[in-house]
């Protein structure tokens, strides 16, 4: 059976990921010293979130839902 996930923001820098089928918190992603700007957005097996750090640098981060591990990040520039 395929997993089904949901996610919510907790505070400024944490994301709680839930296993919807079991009805439990699967894990928590601590984003570190940043503020969440947008997200989390879940698509298939990935979770995407946009964060801003103390230097106003905006970064997109993509996590694997299966493991909760960061799989890709990218800088977002305003032009």
Image: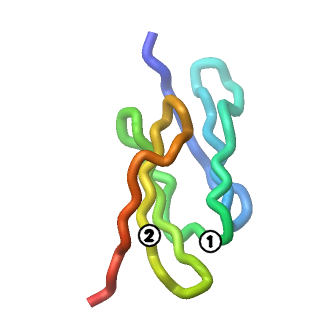
Which residue is pictured at 61% across the width and 83% down the height?
A: 54
Task: Identify the image's colour scheme: rainbow, by chain, secondary structure or one colour.
Answer: rainbow
Image x and y of residue 29, in percent: 64, 48
**Is 18 rendered above or below residue 77?**
above
Q: Nearer the viewer, residue 69 or 60?
A: 69
Q: Secondary structure at mark 1?
A: strand
Image check: 75 left or right of 69? left
Q: Secondary structure at mark 2?
A: strand
Which residue is pictured at 57% across the width and 77% down the height?
A: 53
Which residue is pictured at 62% across the width and 71% down the height?
A: 34
| Number of marks drawn | 2
Image x and y of residue 35, in percent: 61, 72
**Is 56 rendered above or below residue 53?**
below
Q: Which residue is mark 2?
A: 59
Q: Quadrant of the C terminus?
A: bottom left
* Crowd tier of the residue under label 2, counting other residues whose Cα lies within 10 Å: few below 14, some 14–19, many 20 or above: some
């Amino acid at each position: 059976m395929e997993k089904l996930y949901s996610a919510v923001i907790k505070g400024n820098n944490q994301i709680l990921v839930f296993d919807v089928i079991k009805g439990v918190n699967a894990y928590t992603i601590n984003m570190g010293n940043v503020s969440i700007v947008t997200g989390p957005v879940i698509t298939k097996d990935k979770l995407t979130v946009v964060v801003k750090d103390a230097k106003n640098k905006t970064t997109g981060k993509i996590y694997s839902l299966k493991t909760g591990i960061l799989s890709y990040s990218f800088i977002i520039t305003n032009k």
